[in-house]
Amino acid sequence: MYVPLHVYSDFSLGYGSASADELAERGRELGLVALALTDIECLAGQMRFHYECKSRGLKAITGVELRKDFSTLEGLSVGKSDRLILLARNRRGYEELCKLVSLRRSTARPDSVLPMERAAALARSSSSDLFFLTDDQASAEHLLNNGLDVSALRLLLVRPGHRSSVSENALISFATSNDIRIVADPMVVMLRPEDRPLHILQMAIKLKKTVGEVNRIGESAERHMMEAERFVEVFRDLPHAVAETLSIAEQCSLDLTGQKLVFPQIGLSTISQASPLNQLRAACSEVIAKFPEEYKQRLEGEMQVIAENGFASYFLVVAEFTREARRRGIAVAARGSAVSSLVAYALGITSVDPVKNGLIFERFLHQHRQEPPDIDLDFASDRRGEIQAWVGDRFGRDRVAAISA
């Protein structure tokens, strides 16, 4: 048995060819106990990866691969010099990875934030929170010279066909002389050998070259998720390197599926001392009090579902957005399944009466749904930036983010 600790998904754009769920399913088919995801300069697939692995009985391990020249198309796809793979042992390690990726992504010249420079700082502060993996001797020496505890450092032995026997022997000799453990690494780029054409096609698109031009620099079909028997055979001369993959997996405890959303605690002006649920109930009841009994029953049913899922604060936050837009005279409208909610209607988030129009609340939210509801708001395009700026001022610019879907 072994654990693949160096795996790319299709979030390594133009390189990895498998989705998070495909990786997890293949891991289940092979009988693996754990699986790592180490996309290039990216953590975007981690949350989905954890849920997909958990649903199949696998332990998910979060990691990221940093590359010195990742800002260039060529560097992202084929440049492997000075690369470093970081694995999160725990929540603090994951937070460090998030900070590091954010720093590199937000820098005008990301290649100026070199992996080894930032890793050296992490080496002095996060040896117990991260594993540092590299297949480059110079990188390993740099980390050790900057205070990394040798217990957190591993040398990757990438097989098959990645290094010459001479350089491989040199790496093993260096590891032995410095008491550094070696880890067997299949470097998984694709699920199966027959997926190589997809890998090559993606690289060709990324590099804006022909398939023929890319074919010689793309990864071989050997870079797939191997059966345990094949993996053990590839590393038959280094069984301790295979065993080390399991040892590392056992020491990684991060579970992103257990995280709960923490909504901002806001208060409506007259009842700000009440809990979010009581605030929401009071605000809606005041509006619905003048409506027929069926509205009150519908409201109670929706409130029960919202209370069970802990989404009261979410509705209050969205209501603040729409209230502020209207106060400023900015056109705003909700769309999608949110118009099925009487609570949203009572708060002024939507303008469609769901009872009158026979809309079903369960299409929007029901008791078995664990993820937060999705309320889509459209603001007048010529003043959308004004609302975005207000959101930053209202909740703190270090607590909000603009994302693309």
Image (spheres, rainbow, N blue to C red):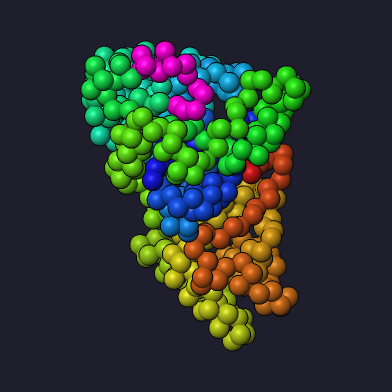
Task: Name the residue nearer the viewer: 278 or 38.
Answer: 38
Q: Per the image, is 160 magenta?
A: yes
Q: Quadrant of the C terminus?
A: top right
| Apparent side of residue 90 relative to residue 195 in the rendered image (left or right) | left
* Spot occupied by residue 75 in the image (x, y as percentages of width and height): 57, 18
Please indicate, yes or no, whether residue 283 appears anywhere in the rendered image. Answer: no
Please indicate, yes or no, whether residue 357 appears anywhere in the rendered image. Answer: yes
* Spot occupied by residue 31 in the image (x, y as percentages of width and height): 45, 53
Question: Which residue is located at x 60 percent, y 24 percent?
Answer: 77
| Apparent side of residue 257 relative to residue 315 in the rendered image (left or right) | left
Q: Per the image, is 242 magenta?
A: no
Query: From which residue to which does the magenta span run?
Result: 158-171
Question: Which residue is located at x 47 percent, y 28 percent?
Answer: 159
Question: Which residue is located at x 37 percent, y 16 percent?
Answer: 169
Vertical placement of residue 99 versus 337, above or below: above
Quarter of the image for residue 310 reads bottom left
* Spot occupied by residue 214 in the image (x, y as percentages of width and height): 69, 22
Vertical placement of residue 78 versus 347, above or below: above
